Image: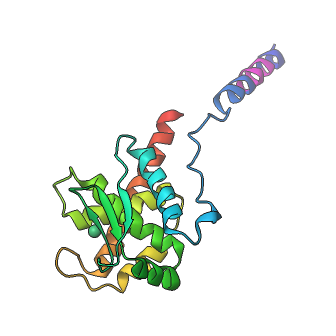
Amino acid sequence: MKKAAALALWTLLLLLASTCCTPHALNPPPAPVSQSCSGTVDCLYEEVFAAVASRYPHLEKPELIPDPLVPNALYRFEQNQVLYWAGFLQTIMDGYGRKAVAGVLAHELGHAVCLNRLSTSAEECADVAAGCILFDMRLSIEPLQEWLRTTEGGGDYPPGEVRALLVEEGRNRCAMQSLVDRLKDE
Ligand SMILES: [Zn+2]
């Protein structure tokens, strides 16, 4: 009798284990950035925007325009355009690599994401958004942070060290959100 009870208990436990621990279908992480974009800004921009669109499917894609007259890169909200000077991005590519360039493009697209968020300054919000976008692309934020730390800030820009922290905050927020979403799915 005792043996039968023990056997029944084991059967029940095995049954529970087989149902409770079947892996759930998690949302697949976004595809990592392909290596084909190493050289071109246009291609990298497409990949950064794909990450933005996965989180904000209704966001209208800003047009990317090379402009030798802008000193670095900027977002023009009236026209929904990202303008950049190729020399600026090339300098970042040479010094900090394509992940940092992706980060700069993510910052500019971050401005489009941040348009309706009035609680923080536009530059701070764009830095937070950049961290989130890089997380979605499964790219390290460190190259972007490294470059930001060399910037001095001023005007609307916080000091570089603060900007690096804002990027980290964005990365952490979206990493946490992603974790919560996964737990909800289970
Ligand atoms: Zn900006």
Q: Is residue 168 visible?
A: no
What segment carries the magenta color?
Answer: 6-13
Q: Is residue 104 left or right of residue 125?
A: right
The overriding secondary structure of the stretch rendered in magenta is helix
Front-lying residue, 146 or 74: 74
- Report the quarter where the C terminus lies: top right
Where residue 151 sits, quadrant-wise, is: bottom left
Q: Is residue 80 left or right of residue 57?
A: left
Q: Residue at x 30, y 63 (%)?
A: 126
Q: Residue at x 30, y 53 (%)?
A: 113
Question: Is residue 16 within the magenta segment?
Answer: no
Q: Residue at x 32, y 80 (%)?
A: 161
Q: How is the image coloured?
A: rainbow
Question: Is residue 7 within the magenta segment?
Answer: yes
Image spot of residue 67 (x, y percent): 34, 73
Image spot of residue 91 (x, y percent): 45, 84
Image spot of residue 69 (x, y percent): 29, 78
Front-lying residue, 52 or 62: 62
Instruction: Find ligand 1 in the image and state its quadrant.
Output: bottom left
Q: Residue at x 18, y 64 (%)?
A: 121
